[in-house]
Amino acid sequence: MTTTRWIRWVLKPALFTAALVPVAYLIWAALTGNLTANPIQELEHETGLWTLRFVCLTLAVTPLRRVTGWNSLIRFRRMLGLYAFFYGTLHLLTYVVLDQFFAFQTMLVDVTKRPYITVGFAGFVLMIPLAITSTAGMIRRLGGRRWNLLHRLIYVTAVAGVVHYWWLVKADERSPERYALAVGVLLGFRLLYLAWKSRSRLAPAPAAAGGRTPFRLDAERDASLD
């Protein structure tokens, strides 16, 4: 079996199924009474955490691809990003339907008066255009450069998610600190890679035949952070 077929028929279905396990468990736990004493809060907490985890996994694709050289990893990024949006939607719906029961006036006050809700809601809103433009057709319509620029919003979403979690936690901050470290490393890698690539483009290559010294051009000409 070729690598492409292995990814399409084995790895991607396995990842798709594995990504549904958390929501399947939460449904089972809710139906069987196996959540905590505050089930709504537990659902909000878990769906929010899985949103942040899938955002981190999405951001991790590019560094892993750069380090390992396995460019086929890019095939999983869209799925991971859509699952981040899926769990983010569940997180929002849990708040809107189960916690507030469609009390839109109260929710509006929360969004404007409670900073952790404000930044969390902003992070979710930024995910919407990313989900809408995730298809190959939208990439063609927007063009690669504009699509890349738009999808850098995931960096803002990741930071907003960490801040939302950090401001929500009132006592033990070790968990949000770990996610902040993960997001910092993943974004820092991109900045370091961009700096290295810019420097390597300007570095003079060994002298060519005839005494010419052309500048070295990197194999990847796209200077995006990816």
Image (cartoon, rainbow, N blue to C red):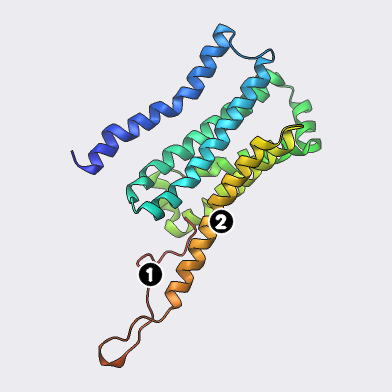
Q: Is residue 137 visible?
A: yes
Which residue is outermost to the bottom?
211
- State if disc 2 and disc 1 touch (CB < 8 Å): no
Q: Earlier in the sequence, mark 1 or mark 2?
A: 2
On screen, residue 101 above or below 177 = above
Q: In the image, is residue 103 above or below residue 182?
A: above
Q: Is residue 212 left or right of residue 197?
A: left
Q: Quadrant of the N terminus?
A: top left
Residue 188, labelled with which disc?
2
Front residue (pair 188, 78): 188
Label 2, residues with CA under 10 Å away: few <14, some 14-19, many ≥20: few
Task: Find the distance from the CA under tag 1 to the CA under tag 2.
Answer: 21 Å
Q: Residue pushed farthest left?
A: 1
Q: Is residue 77 left or right of residue 127?
A: left
Residue 181 placement, left or right of 142: right
Using the image, tell me which numbered label, if any, was put on residue 218.
1
Q: At numbered mark 2, what does the secondary structure look like: helix, strand or loop?
A: helix
Q: Quadrant of residue 53?
A: top right
